[in-house]
Structures are given as structure tokens and as C-alpha cells.
Image (cartoon, rainbow, N blue to C red):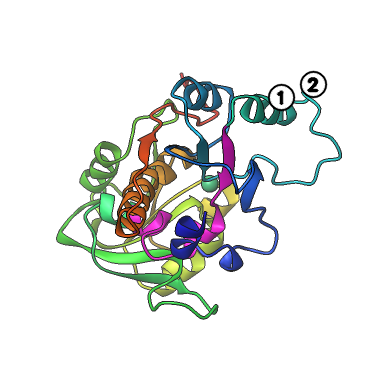
Amino acid sequence: MAAVHRRYDPSTAESWDAVGLVCGDPAQSVSRVHFAVDAVEATVDEALAAGADLLITHHPLLLTPVSSVAATTPAGGLIHRLIGGGCALLAVHTNADLALDGVSDTLAEALGLGGVRALIPSDIPGPAGTGLGRVGELATAMNLGDFAALVHRSLPLTAAGLRIAGDLERPVRRVAVCGGSGAGALSAAAAAGVDVMVTADLKHHNAGDHMAAGGPALVDVAHWASEWPWLQRAADLLVTDLGADGVTVDTYVSRIVTDPWTARL
Ligand SMILES: [Zn+2]
């Protein structure tokens, strides 16, 4: 946990967030670490079947306060199974959004952006470059249609796919990204003079008002797909950081798609 939290300081998480250890005993030994965006039945099954001692997820299982973790509740059932299987659960959520080598940094890298910097620089003391979302440039300009195709092939496939707002012939070079729900960063993207923003969970009025105001084009991807690439980076960094301390762990990044949208017509 200390190694994870050196990269993704829990004190930098949003005040509404619930990061950290969800269940498990810090004194327990860990040799196999499983990574997933969400703790759901399928990813918990997978972690337990693999003999994982620790499941690290991006989304907290218990984001809102609960008064029971009885096995008859969906989250309580998962917690019982994790404890029974000797697998701890650690949530690394908004502390991984803002950080260097975090969710948005990895999304920017997956799209091949250069000159990457924070879209909304953090006001929390920390390394330069931290903050919400990232801005960077493509090596060569392309039209919006080709850029959307680049996003599509750079991120894992989901049933929801991606949606585009803007003229497909519009040239794009400067790009803003915000992993997860980035509606709150739309005005910052417009102010940063980007040509297109890539994020998830945009609603009708977010997108409509933004486009009516002449804002940058939008590529709205599946929430899960925008965050999944970070898991491998987090796993690699954990192996590297623990390795420097002479500690070896096995890691596995789940490929199970936990986006709740399972089909589209
Ligand atoms: Zn998310």
C-alpha cells in the first residue's frame, strides 16, 4: 500500500471520494496483485481464481456510506467473498486521476500525444504537471474523423463504442483528454484552445451547450475504456517500485470489460 500511495497519494483524492483499503489487513502478506477498473462479480471471481492476495481497483466499491456489509447486499457479498478468499481490496480513484503516471496521463500516452501538460493544474502541493485532465499535441494534424478512428483503435473495445460531436472534416492537432467523467473540464478545454476533447459520460446538455458555444469537437468514449489503460501502468510501476526495494510481486491486469453498457442496436 505504501508503494502504491507513494505514486498516488490518498491525501490528493477529492473530498467526496473513498480511496484506500476497502477490506483486508495491512499485516497480511501479498505476492499476487490483480488490477481492475471495477470490483464486480466477474473481476472478483477472476482475482480469487488467480489466487490474488490484493485486488486494486480504480472505482471504490463503497463510494457512498453504507450501514451494512451483509452478504445479502451486492457490495457486501463481494466483501465477504474477498475476505473469505484472503484477498484485500484497495481503491485508487481520484488520487490516480490527478497524479503523474495517472489515468489521464496514460490516456494521453495511449493516443500518442506529445508535450503533455495538466488541463486544470492542481492547487494541491505536489510534482509539476499534476492536475485534472491533460492537454497535448498530435505529431501531425488530422481530420476529426481520422482522429476518432485513432481513439477507437487505441482504446479497448466496448459495446458502447464512442460518439463524436463536430464536423468530421475539421482538422485537429491539439487535444484535451480527461479519463472518466470529464464534463466539468469542458470549459477548461475550450479555454486551452484545443481542437478536440476526449472524455466520457457527456450528457445531451453538456455536449449541446458546449458545441453551440463553438467549443472544441468532442469524442465521448466508454468510461471504462478511458480508464482501463492506466491499470497496466500502475501494475508496471508497482513492480518497478517494489523491485527497487528488493520485493517481487506478480501482477495481472483484468481484461474483463466492466462497462455497464453491454449492447447497442
Ligand atoms: Zn471512473
Query: Mark 2 or mark 1, which is nearer the start of the sequence?
Result: 2
Residue 28 image offset from top left, x and y in percent: 57, 42
Given the image, on which type of amino acid does mark 2 rest?
Thr
Label 2, ligand 1: CB separation under 8 Å: no
Given the image, on which type of amino acid does mark 1 rest?
Gly
The answer to whether 91 is drawn above or below residue 40 in the figure is below
Q: Which residue is mark 1?
A: 77
Farthest residue toward the left?
Answer: 140
> Considering the numbered disc 1 on the image, is that residue within a helix, a strand or a loop?
helix
> Considering the numbered disc 2 on the image, is that residue within a helix, a strand or a loop?
loop
Q: Residue at x 51, y 81 (%)?
A: 125
Residue 227 image offset from top left, x and y in percent: 43, 45
Which portion, as a residue range, is magenta?
Answer: 87-106
Farthest residue toward the right?
Answer: 67
Residue 135 image offset from top left, x and y in percent: 34, 66
Tell whether 193 sits left or right of 261: left
Q: Residue at x 60, y 47 (%)?
A: 27
Q: Quadrant of residue 34?
A: top left
Report, in whole angstroms, how far the alpha carbon at label 1 lies from the one at label 2.
6 Å
Tell whether label 2 touches label 1 (CB within 8 Å): yes
Q: Quadrant of residue 193?
A: bottom left
Residue 75 image offset from top left, x and y in percent: 71, 31
How many neighbours does mark 2 have within 10 angstroms: few (below 14), some (14-19), or many (20 or more)?
few
Q: Residue at x 70, y 27 (%)?
A: 80
Tell whether 143 sits left or right of 105: left
Tell whether 224 sits left or right of 134: right
In the rendered structure, find residue 72 and report the number of the disc placed on it: 2
